[in-house]
Image (cartoon, grey):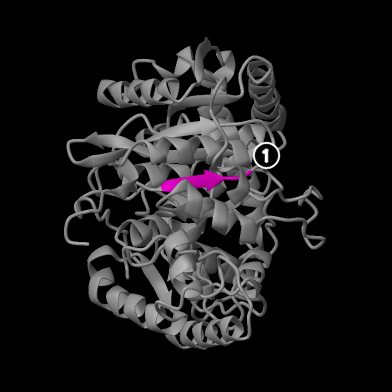
Amino acid sequence: MHQLTLAEIARGLADKKFSSEELTKVLLARIAQLDPQLNSFISLTEDLALTQAKAADARRANGESGALLGAPIAHKDLFCTQGIRTSCGSKMLDNFKAPYDATVVAKLAAAGAVTLGKTNMDEFAMGSANESSYYGAVKNPWNLEYVPGGSSGGSAAAVAARLLPAATGTDTGGSIRQPAALTNLTGLKPTYGRVSRWGMIAYASSLDQGGPLARTAEDCAILLQGMAGFDPNDSTSIDEPVPDYSASLNGSLQGLRIGVPKEYFSAGLDPRIADLVMASVEELKKLGAVIKEISLPNMQHAIPAYYVIAPAEASSNLSRFDGVRFGYRCEDPKNLEDLYKRSRGEGFGTEVQRRIMVGAYALSAGYYDAYYLKAQKIRRLIKNDFMAAFNEVDIILGPTTPNPAWKLGAKNSDPVAAYLEDVYTITANLAGLPGLSMPAGFVEGLPVGVQLLAPYFQEGRLLNVAHQYQLNTDWHTRTPTGF
């Protein structure tokens, strides 16, 4: 049962081959048995899951149907879930139980999805390796000595290890697509505003976006269908009709114009990954796509611009965690200043403190124009590059990451080396574009992903291309040994 995809589970439940309750019990037992190796979950919600599974079975018995009705999933632990710990991977929120459900959680619950638990993540979604979590690092099921990517590494590791068929993640600079690439999954970052951020604890508000992680593009289409839509509670949510993503999966790729940016193939890219990217290009050419070299001239400025804008927004967002109203509070503070200093100093980890300090510096009176304002201008130039490119092509293709997964702890002493792993993904966040990573091969037994980018609200096009590619390749069907 654990090998079934979301689509196969939906068919199995509809054909009464098994019940949601039976499936939920199997997966909960599998998590209890295997997750100690991975550390992919922060909280398990067995009672809630069984209650939701029984309710889903009752709804099906009454004639209801739906792809998510009775389907088991998990949520990244920054989506607020009523009455359940929502920690953001931080000591700061270790004791926080959300008083309400995030919109994404509520929408998926209404569709009948069964929540098995909350997955581990980099603290406050800050990281590319899932090593900054207060609850310890997550391990990559393909090799337990390696990182799964971050910050949605818990969701990625759990799905890759077949502990459950799909999970939610969030993507601020590649935090869905990068772990998807490093664990052999399909991961989709939707257009900014496509999925509500209400109840999603913020890292960088103009960049964060929730999305699905699953084994196939077909499953991502099912989960995105349940997540997407306008939310009046979220001022950045866009009132745009949600198409039927599954309906567009089988469209022909004949004549589809795919752009391959020359800037992607620089000295920083592992040549073995470059070969796999070009192999995927050849596969798509066989399906009728037309390939064109394009240029994104301002891509070289993306990393410095992102690492000014994101920490600046983080320093503002995280100022609310002060030890007064909720979250961690230090023992026996001498006065208000001591309360603030020690609560934040003890509650936040090293990477979060680093980014808060960088952000506060960039926003300070003497440096705002020199750093933050300049970074926002570069952001506009990057967006303009994409707009120009999409006048020539329908999709942009390239590597998701410059390297395969690295060993746990290998980049802890050099945070900039870890930041550079996001070089291909952060541009989509800066421009607000949808992006998808799909499995495209292996380097020394470690998975590699190929990234697709599309114009605004063209998630269906991304899913169509990935699905057609997956019908003609089998990379996405490979399972890590032992799982």
Position of the C terminus by quadrant: bottom left
The local secondary structure at tag 1 comes to helix
Residue 360 is at least partly visible in this image: no
Residue at position x 18%, y 41% from top?
Answer: 445
Residue 436 is at least partly visible in this image: yes
Q: Is residue 206 above or below residue 317?
A: above
Residue at position x 34%, y 54% from top?
Answer: 131
Which sits in the foreground, 341 or 414? 414
| Quarter of image, res 40 | bottom left
Residue at position x 54%, y 80% from top?
Answer: 84
Q: Is residue 349 above or below residue 400?
A: below
Residue placed under numbered mark 1 in the picture: 363
Q: Give the left or right position of residue 72, taking residue 81 as reference.
A: left
Residue type, label 1: Leu
Is 278 one of the magenta-colored residues? no
Q: Is residue 112 above or below residue 269?
A: below
Q: Main secondary structure of the magenta part?
A: strand
Q: What span is colored magenta in the figure?
A: 186-190
Total numbered labels placed on residues in the image: 1
Position of the N terminus by quadrant: bottom left
| Quarter of image, res 271 | top left
Residue at position x 45%, y 78% from top?
Answer: 16
Is 189 one of the magenta-colored residues? yes
Which sits in the foreground, 416 or 468? 468
Q: x%, y% of residue 230?
A: 77, 56
Q: Residues within 10 Å of mark 1 (few under 14, many from 20)?
A: many
